[in-house]
Amino acid sequence: MPKLNMVQAVTLALEEQMTTDESVVVLGEDVGVDGGVFRATEGLLDKFGEQRVIDTPLAESGIVGASIGMAMAGLKPVAEMQFSGFSYLSIPQMEGHASRMRARTMGQFTVPMVLRMPYGGGVRALEHHSESREVLYAHNPGLKVVIPSGPRNTRALLAAAIQDPDPVVFMEPKRSYRAFKEEVPAEPETMEIGKCQIVQEGTDITVVAWGAMMHTTKKAVKEIEKERGISIELIDVLTISPLDSDTICESVRKTGRCAIIQEAARSFGPASEIIACINDKSLLYLEAPVQRVTGYDVVTPYFNRELDYMPTVGRISRGIIEAVDF
Amino acid sequence: MPKTKLSDFSISYMQILDENGAVDTDLEPSLSKEQLVELYRHMQWGRITDERMLKLQRQGRIGTFGPSIGQEAAHCASMFCMRDDDWFVGCFREHGARLMRGESLVKQLNYFNGYTEGNVGGNPRNLPVSVIVGAQGLHAVGLAYASKLKGEDSVAIVYQGDGATSQGDFHEALNFASVWNVPVIFVVQNNQWAISVPREKQTKSKSIAQKAIAYEMNGIQVDGNDPLAVYTATKEAADRARNGEGPTLIEAVTYRMMMHTTADDQYKYRTKEEEDSWKPKDPLVRFRKYLENKSYWDNKAEDKLQAELKADCDAQVKEFESQADFPRDVSFEHVFGTEHAVISEQKVEFDQELEEENDA
């Protein structure tokens, strides 16, 4: 079983899916000769040719709009946005057409495309390169929003996204791209979209995170368990929409406590939605208010200040302990 | 060093049949009597059904819609070149062309009565109505890319208005189409008005066709009320596209004879006199003259056609109004192609609420 980092896992999934399904095409800015600015599509041009690995003009709306047409004609386009911050230029196409085509035609036309984009902070990049705006997509009925957290689930979820009959926004936490390696199975595997994963079982508190925050949260969880001798149930959300609230709410009914770790700005974020679901399904089981450890409701600061903005191991630990000690 | 000339550009205008019925025999397309009469019938069907829809809207029997009256040559004669396996990508002002693609009037009425059921059926390569202005050119580019990749010789034809040419997506579509050399025909129905904004405030360019030059693409301006010119330009574009010679931009100069939509009052921004000045250029009037000059048509044939189309229209309106009610919870069926717990839960809730209301 090879050990891969997250970027290599993306490449592997693309290569596997392009090999088994001729309708899969990859397109975007610099995805061909350059192999993508993060090298996620490296080697694909040589292997599959320029008809299926397309260096597009620099126009995000164009990339997505053309992908929609390709998908309606039976191809499975995997479009890359260089950074999630540039994808907003294509939101009119995603909201106005990709998300609606199935409903608009009562299933006659569908848009089985994947929109890949690196998102999130922590890599000392320029403005517009560090935001975590998954809710912009999650609030659109008809779009699925997937956020992997490590190499293995990246490869499995990207495969599932490519095989999915609906448009999937696949947000890759770029801070984790090369942060660590993980063993991935030699054979292709998929994970079900729309399901959380219980990373470790526990009894005293449910901790929920996703994306790059998983890595930081795992460190905090390990520290607290050691220091306090408590048992933490850790859940990786993996799919922001459709949200698997059942798994989270069931866990909260068991532990009675919950902390949610979110890189994005606090208000109207996925954490708010998760709390609303707990309110609907598990409120009377709670022993303490649900804690949110999040980014702040400010414009994402430039990189010299971004680590103060993002939840750190310390902030996450304090949030978890507050829920435990309440 | 002196400046050197990089390139010379020119753009053509084509008219074959003028408003008096005079024809340029050098450019006249070789269409049989049957073909010409068939095209005339399509244009009349578009006009008659559009006029009926206007009445139905005024009577509150359907919702808001944008009439295509006056633009029948621009969209019907261009569609007349296309094959069934070509892709039809419309916006909402090519009513006659949509009907030519196997879509019934009943379906159109359902759509404009606020039911998605009106978007389903017809030719499986008809895209649904696209309300957002200018977005759909890119879809045509993607469809055409797929045709090319699969080795098909089908073409995507996409309809847009003069207002759409100001949108970024319009330009991105032209650029992508040209760089990728894909089989797309961009038809711009330049009807002079984007709601209240006249063509000269939309773009400083002397023509819309010339925007093709910047993208190294074939472009031509035609008299959009002349079905022979529209047909010829589109046929040439389709032949080139099938031959691997890439996309074409056709500007069909026409006039929106009515309001933007039934929710609009056009006399707030333009005069009755201006509208009247376009009446002699009506595409149906001149096409009928052409057919009559060729002895393909006469009053008797016209009366017979009008009676037939009116009867068909009456029958379809009747069918539309006698349909059983559509289900109220259909919106929950087509959000995703896979089971979605949240949607399923909400559908149960929705159905329960409906029952509560029925019981109340």
Image: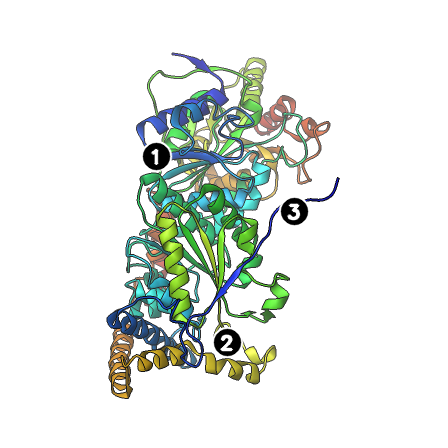
Q: Are marks 1 and 2 in contact (CB under 8 Å)?
A: no
Compared to residue B197, the image places residue B342 above or below, namely: above
**In the image, what residue type sits under mark 1?**
Gln
Q: Position of residue A229 (x, y in %)?
A: 54, 15
Q: Chain of mark 2?
A: B
Alpha carbons under labels 2 and 3: distance apart: 46 Å
Quadrant in the rendering for residue B228:
bottom left
Foreground label between 2 and 3: 3
**In the image, what residue type sits under mark 3?**
Lys
Q: Is residue B314 visible?
A: yes
Q: Position of residue A100 (x, y in %)?
A: 42, 51
Q: Which residue is mark 1?
A: A163
Q: Which residue is mark 3?
A: B5
Q: Horizontal placement of A145 versus B235: left or right?
A: right
The residue sitting at 48% across, 77% down in the picture is: B257
Alpha carbons under labels 1 and 3: distance apart: 52 Å
Q: Chain of mark 1?
A: A
Q: Secondary structure at mark 3?
A: loop
Q: Are tags 2 and 3 found on a single chain?
A: yes
Name the mark on residue B259: 2
**In the image, what residue type sits under mark 2?**
Met
Foreground label between 1 and 3: 3
Q: Nearer the viewer, residue B313 or A85?
A: B313
Q: Position of residue A2 (x, y in %)?
A: 41, 12
Alpha carbons under labels 1 and 2: distance apart: 46 Å
The residue sitting at 48% across, 43% down in the picture is: A64
Question: Crowdedness of circle 2 by 10 Å Cα count: few (<14), some, many (20+)?
Answer: some
Q: Chain of mark 3?
A: B
